Image (spheres, helix red, strand yellow):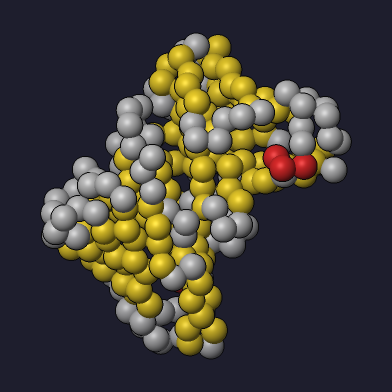
Amino acid sequence: GQQVMQIPQYQHVQEGEDFTTYCNSSTTLSNIQWYKQRPGGHPVFLIQLVKSGEVKKQKRLTFQFGEAKKNSSLHITATQTTDVGTYFCAGPTGTASKLTFGTGTRLQVTL
Amino acid sequence: DAGITQSPRHKVTETGTPVTLRCHQTENHRYMYWYRQDPGHGLRLIHYSYGVKDTDKGEVSDGYSVSRSKTEDFLLTLESATSSQTSVYFCAINRDYGYTFGSGTRLTVV
């Protein structure tokens, strides 16, 4: 079945440093979604990318969808302690709007 | 998130006992999902529903059953809980702009 992998699994940065997580799917995706989960919380939808090569920005977060629609990345510029959490990518699979989630990247930010 | 609630939030149960987790939505969404989250595995789909009395299996459905007798309620049952089912369980609904998750149920099987 479809597999969605993310790297790295964990990253620890100092506040102000940049951070990037990468997402790779075993199959071509019609779209890709990104979610953030704060420690002890539930995943929260951030964004959806649909077009090949699409780039979207949300303040310090930049999301990219690869040209082949099999990979994606999330880049955070000048991290803040509020960015702490686990970031998941997810791609549609099969019917009923099901999603397959990546394994997630846990981000730790220290002062 | 407003519109989707899970109960209970925490539960400790003994091996071999049945357990039912409840997911309730107030927005009449057709699709509902149950995921479990474990370290190193991310979120894995257990079962999903595409309408009242219409359900199907996900990738990790063994040992679980579901029911959806009303649009607003999606129940997940562990017929005979095992220690491997200790996990955090999330329910989700599909909105046009992505999934909205409930706050989760932390289940411990001892």
Left or right, B29 with respect to B65, comes to left
Residue at image position (35%, 74%) is: A20
From the viewer's perspective, is residue B48 above or below residue B82? above
Left or right, B28 with respect to B35, comes to left
Residue at image position (49%, 68%) is: A9
Q: How many numbered marks, from 0 up?
A: 0
User: Quick check: can you spot residue B20?
Assistant: no
Percent of width and height locating residue A108: 53, 75
From the viewer's perspective, is residue A34 above or below residue A64? above
Residue at image position (37%, 69%) is: A21
User: Quick check: can you spot residue A94?
Assistant: yes
Left or right, A48 with respect to B69, comes to left
Instruction: Point out the image quarter for the N terminus of chain A.
Output: top left
From the viewer's perspective, is residue A83 above or below residue B50? below
- The front one of B61 and A56 is B61
Percent of width and height locating residue A11: 48, 76
Residue at image position (49%, 31%) is: B58
Percent of width and height locating residue B107: 73, 42
Percent of width and height locating residue B47: 52, 29
